[in-house]
Amino acid sequence: MSGITILVIDDDASIHTAVERRLRGVVDEVLKADSPTKGLQFAIRERPDVILLDVNMPQIDGFKVCRHLQENPTTHDIPILFLTADDKPENLAKALDAGASDYISKPFNAVELEARVRVALRTKHMIDLLRERARIDALTGLNNRAAMDDALIAATAAFHRTEQPLALLMIDLDHFKTINDTYGHGVGDDVIRKVGMSIRAGCRPYDIACRFGGDEFGVILAQTDTACAEQIAERILDEINKIKIRAGSDEIDVACSGGLASATDMPLRFEPAELLKAADEALYTAKSEGRNRLAVAEVSD
């Protein structure tokens, strides 16, 4: 599905036709469901930008459908506009209480329909922006821990499905606490920002770089076998090691350690947490062997 899509859930086919005609040029596609059951299935599968929902339908009324949509994490954030021929205040209040964003009275005016749909689309756009920002680390612009967890789950599932190579690199700055304690958190934040830039510079377009937390970072290397992953990891660590931060009259060198784990070296049907643990253990090895180096996980069956 691409472009702006709305879903009309109404048992009256003439409503589908009228909406499609009157919103031509406003949306790219109008999906149509003539029953609550089909509407719920469409909403979950297609995840439209806006849902137009009839209040009065057989078997399940619009209020119950709205509550189902609100309770499902997949559809929870989709704006719902009720279509209703009953504009009594108590029923409109009930619609809003059920989770609807707005309502449109039947028979609807073309100008009003377009205006209310445009408002709902702006609402959806803002929701999407907020959700995206919630997955971005504010200091570095990299993905945050939540985004990394989701990406690692998806990458592991893809590996099990296609057996395409996959590797995970974990990075931790060496002696970062000393920098914070000596020069203050402002300088420490500058270091973190520069590290984020360096990691991004060392990654390929399809790698997924994240700030795991504090001074620890992760990079998901898709379609990458162990040998290639080692080369990329070394390149990323080299980029970080080039960083120099000016703090008053001092110039601070930045160093880091890395731990690398490859999916092809993991036991059969491993979980994402197991790959993360293997990379973390390799990182611990790099730290214990003197820091400022890369260690590769050795996983036994």
Image (tube, helix red, strand yellow):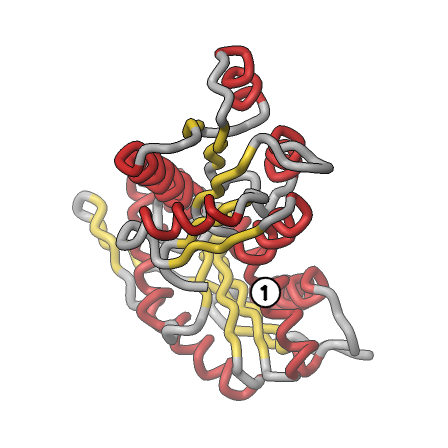
Position of residue 285 measured from the top left corner of the image (x, y, whole percent): 63, 67
Q: How many residues crowd around disc 1 within 10 Å: few (fewer than 14), some, or many (20 or more)?
A: many
**Residue closer to the observer: 294 or 95:** 95
- Give the left or right position of residue 277, taking residue 244 as reference: right
Residue 117 shows in this picture? yes
Q: Is residue 143 above or below residue 156?
A: above
Q: Position of residue 282 (x, y in %)?
A: 63, 69
Q: Would residue 178 appear left or right of 183 to someone viewing this image?
A: right
140 vs 226, left or right, is left
* Residue 174 seen in the current view: no
The extreme bottom residue here reads: 227
Residue drawn at 46 percent across, 64 percent down: 1
Image spot of residue 187 (x, y percent): 29, 43
Q: Quadrant of residue 73?
A: top right
Residue 12, relative to residue 156: is it above or below? above
Secondary structure state at the residue bearing disc 1: helix
Residue designated by label 1 = 283
Q: Nearer the viewer, residue 91 or 160?
A: 91
Give the number of marks.
1
Q: What residue appears at the point 28 percent right and 35 percent down from the top-left corner? A: 115
Q: Quadrant of the C terminus?
A: bottom right
Find residue 205 and report its horizontal and vertical position in percent: 37, 73
- Camera-side residue of 31 and 184: 31
Q: Which of the two residues, 143 or 179, is positioned nearer the viewer here? A: 143
Q: Residue at x 39, y 46 (%)?
A: 19
Residue at the right extreme of this rendering = 301
Type of amino acid under label 1: Leu
Residue 154 placement: quadrant: bottom right
Residue at 50% from the left image edge and 28% from the top image edge: 84
Q: Please identify the residue farthest to the front as the structure is shown.
A: 14
